[in-house]
């Protein structure tokens, strides 16, 4: 398995961890009755760390499809070089760092970490061009 595909699979695991973290915060703030309901009642957004973890999860879900498409395109096109490896690693490790940085509410570092993850996607695309 290539490094890029390995980073893709670990990113799936990271996504599941983020979903679990956000769901546990939702359970803590909204309670079991809301969790098991049809959720017809609109609740206010999660607050504090729970809100930040939920927003980090949502942000991951916005960037992950782009990353997955770029990695899979590189794999199908048999493009595997230092640039694709670096791009995949930058994306994954920046996304790993993004979770605790966002949860802690560190503003500039959060934005920088996000930018590094996007730069990883861009490197994958540059390698494909």
Image (cartoon, rainbow, N blue to C red):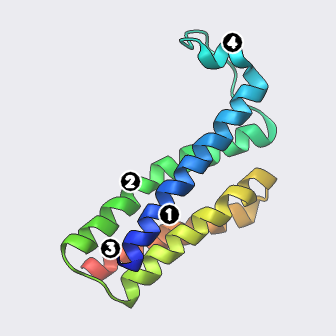
Per the image, the residue denoted by label 1 is 10
Q: Position of residue 54 (x, y in %)?
A: 65, 40
Query: Which image quarter: residue 4?
Result: bottom left
**Circle nearer the viewer, 1 or 3:** 1
Who comes first in sequence, dot 4 or dot 1? 1
* Residue at (54% x, 47% y) in the render: 16
Who comes first in sequence, dot 3 or dot 4? 4
Which label is found at residue 33?
Answer: 4
Q: Where is residue 27 in the image (x, y as percent from the top left)?
A: 71, 27
**Circle nearer the viewer, 3 or 2:** 2
**Circle nearer the viewer, 4 or 2:** 4
Q: Which of 29 and 124 is in front in this view?
A: 29
Q: Quadrant of the N terminus?
A: bottom left
Which label is found at residue 65?
Answer: 2
Crowding at dot 3, Cα within 10 Å, few <14 / some 14-19 / many 20+, comes out as many
CA separation in Å, label 3 and label 4: 45 Å
CA separation in Å, label 4 and label 2: 32 Å
* Residue at (39% x, 86% y) in the render: 83
CA separation in Å, label 1 and label 2: 14 Å
Residue 54 appears in the rendering: no
Who comes first in sequence, dot 4 or dot 2? 4
CA separation in Å, label 1 and label 3: 20 Å
Which label is found at residue 125?
Answer: 3
Who comes first in sequence, dot 1 or dot 3? 1
């Amino acid at each position: 398995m290539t490094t890029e595909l390995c980073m893709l699979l670990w990113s799936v695991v990271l996504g599941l961890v983020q979903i679990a973290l956000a769901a546990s915060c939702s359970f803590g703030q909204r309670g079991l009755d809301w969790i098991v309901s049809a959720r017809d009642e609109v609740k206010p957004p999660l607050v504090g760390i729970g809100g930040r973890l939920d927003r980090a999860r949502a942000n991951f879900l916005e960037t992950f499809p782009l990353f997955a498409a770029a990695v899979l395109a590189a794999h199908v096109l048999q493009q595997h070089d230092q640039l694709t490896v670096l791009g995949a690693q930058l994306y994954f490790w920046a996304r790993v760092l993004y979770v605790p940085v966002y949860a802690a509410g560190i503003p500039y570092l959060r934005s920088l970490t996000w930018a590094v993850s996007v730069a990883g996607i861009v490197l994958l695309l540059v390698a494909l061009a």
